[in-house]
Image: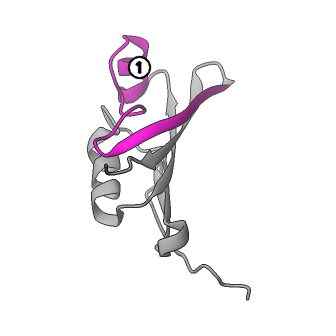
Amino acid sequence: QVWTPCGYSANAFTADEYWTTHITPEEHCSYASFETNASYETYEPIVSEVLDIFKPKRCTLLMLLDADSKCGKRRSSGESIGACGYAGYTMKTRTMNEFGPGYYVIKTDLCKTESK
């Protein structure tokens, strides 16, 4: 069965920015991924919205930013850009890579916190 589990993708773009979301709503492997290079001051509101809407058991976030972007400037000053914790989720891993002077990708893996 090629398309098991099922999943859905949505992509949007402008001249300079893009957003891509993949959702696998299967009970046994609920998953969401979200990637963007959009210029936000912080990714927290949009990531919270993705988590609130789809409620995945697992989620991978890819946040791309350059040092001169709004998020890049916040990150450089030590302020949060939304790459860490979210209510109801535990951060499993977070890595950051620099692909050139001042161009970064931050990958964060989240798992839904188990109810007790």
Depth order, front residue of 14/10: 10
Q: Residue furthest right?
A: 1
| Horizontal and vertical percent position of residue 112 | 41, 50
Please say whether residue 71 is one of the residues in the magenta stretch: yes
Mark 1 secondary-structure assignment? helix
- Residue identified by numbered label 1: 75
| Horizontal and vertical percent position of residue 99 | 68, 28
Please say whether residue 97 is one of the residues in the magenta stretch: yes
For residue 57, above or below residue 108: below
For residue 52, above or below residue 7: above
Q: Residue at x 38, y 39 (%)?
A: 39
In which image quadrant can residue 14 be found? bottom left
Q: Residue furthest front?
A: 116
Q: Which residues are magenta?
A: 70-98
For residue 60, above or below residue 101: below
Check the picture and name the quadrant holding the N terminus. Answer: bottom right
Depth order, front residue of 11/109: 109
Depth order, front residue of 89/2: 89
Classify residue 45 as left or right of residue 11.
Answer: left
Q: Residue at x 37, y 10 (%)?
A: 77
In which image quadrant can residue 6 be found? bottom right
Depth order, front residue of 99/93: 93
Classify residue 59 as left or right of residue 116.
Answer: right
Q: Residue at x 60, y 79 (%)?
A: 5
Three-letter amino acid code at the position of disc 1:
Arg
